[in-house]
Amino acid sequence: MVSAITLDNIEQLAIGSSFLGTGGGGDPYLGSLLCREAIAKYGPVPVISVDELKDEDNVFIAAAMGAPTVMIEKLFSIEDQHRAVTTLERFLGREASAIISAEIGGCNSMMPVAYSAMRGLPIVDGDGMGRAFPALQMTSFNIEGVACAPLTIADEHGNSVLYQTTTGLKAEELARPVAAAMGASVCMSCYPMTGVEARRATIPKTLSGAIAIGEAITNSSDPRPPLDRLIAALRGHEYYKDAAVVFEGKITALERDTSQGWVFGSCSISAMAGSEAAELKFQNENLLVTVDGRLRCVVPDLVTIVDLETAHAIPTERLAYGQRVAVVVCSAPPLLNTARALEVVGPKSFGLEEQYIPVTELIKDLI
């Protein structure tokens, strides 16, 4: 476990969290710029494990909500995030003693670091997904019985909205249209937790895991190709160990539609030689991949498109025709694979017809 997020490891966090974002969560490069500025101004961010949380601690989420395609042009600011968190603090009558990520994927792993630096608070080595998901209810916090609301969202014009809802799904249904009306890109805070609740509901060690993945990809002293280093790092992790490259080729077709506050689409990848082809579907994040019609991975397990040469993940909003890519899949944290969790983050929750089959079974011929 890392002890702090510094200027020396922020790039590794951005690269690793981009992979775990499975195509979504917002472009981490933009988030890394925000982090660099905040850490340079306020200093490194202490990292604490969930086991270090005291029962009476107040753990607050700092996160973004919206469509990744919009986030490229409509940049976040710490001031917007501060408005969302302080609005929630005032309503609850208590202040945050630690910050946590809602999801370890993409920009949503970076904003909490920048905000922690500004507030002088530690960040928890963990999150609510171990990857990225597009909807508020799709978290281990919700699965483990933590209330999503009260929830706040805030935009760059000084507007903030507070919701009190009965379920995480209802919070999603009410907040998403307003977020779209605010420009499809807002800052938010939700799932306020005590230390007791955070210890029970958090997927631990994902922040340090993301840094380890980033370090493996960028380790130029290792003679192996970056893609091989990535797979080795995943197979050495407690959660993501069932990992493989299921396809390599170039992008030959791409469909994207930004609507309802999300990015929906599909991507076709053809082999450089031969007639093999892979098909992916995404909703902000990649949901599944098939190769010649054979299912190779489906949510909640992870599907990520990476650059074939560098192994850097490519967010769905930056996919482009002709890119030479590899499709990497790996297993999800155990908290996401229970029967209760699959009701919230399984294929049916995305309207997919496919049944969930553990990626371990789908790639056993590749390991």
Image (tube, rainbow, N blue to C red):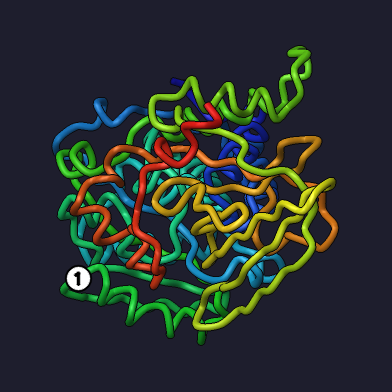
Q: Is residue 51 above or below residue 89?
A: above
Q: Amino acid at mark 1?
A: Thr
Depth check, front residue: 289 or 336 = 289
**Image-based side of 159 in relation to 336, left or right:** right
> Total number of numbered labels?
1
At 64% from the left and 23% from the top, the residue drawn is 216
Up-down: is 42 above or below 23? above
- Quadrant containing the N terminus is top left
Q: Residue at x 53, y 51 (%)?
A: 111
Please tell me which residue is depicted at 23% across the width and 42% down the height of the picture: 198
User: Is 86 displayed left or right of 307 in the figure?
Assistant: left
Q: Nearer the viewer, residue 56 or 254?
A: 254
Q: Could you say where residue 322 lies in the image, as x and y percent from the top left?
A: 85, 58
**Residue denoted by label 1:** 167
Residue 190 showing in the rendered view: yes
Q: Position of residue 133 (x, y in %)?
A: 44, 58
Vertical placement of 260 versus 119: above or below? below
Badge 1 marks a residue whose secondary structure is loop
Residue 342 x, y percent position in the rendering: 27, 55
Residue displayed at 63% across by 30% down = 214
The residue closer to the viewer here, 155 or 309, is: 309
Instruction: Identify whether 147 is placed above or below 263.
Output: above
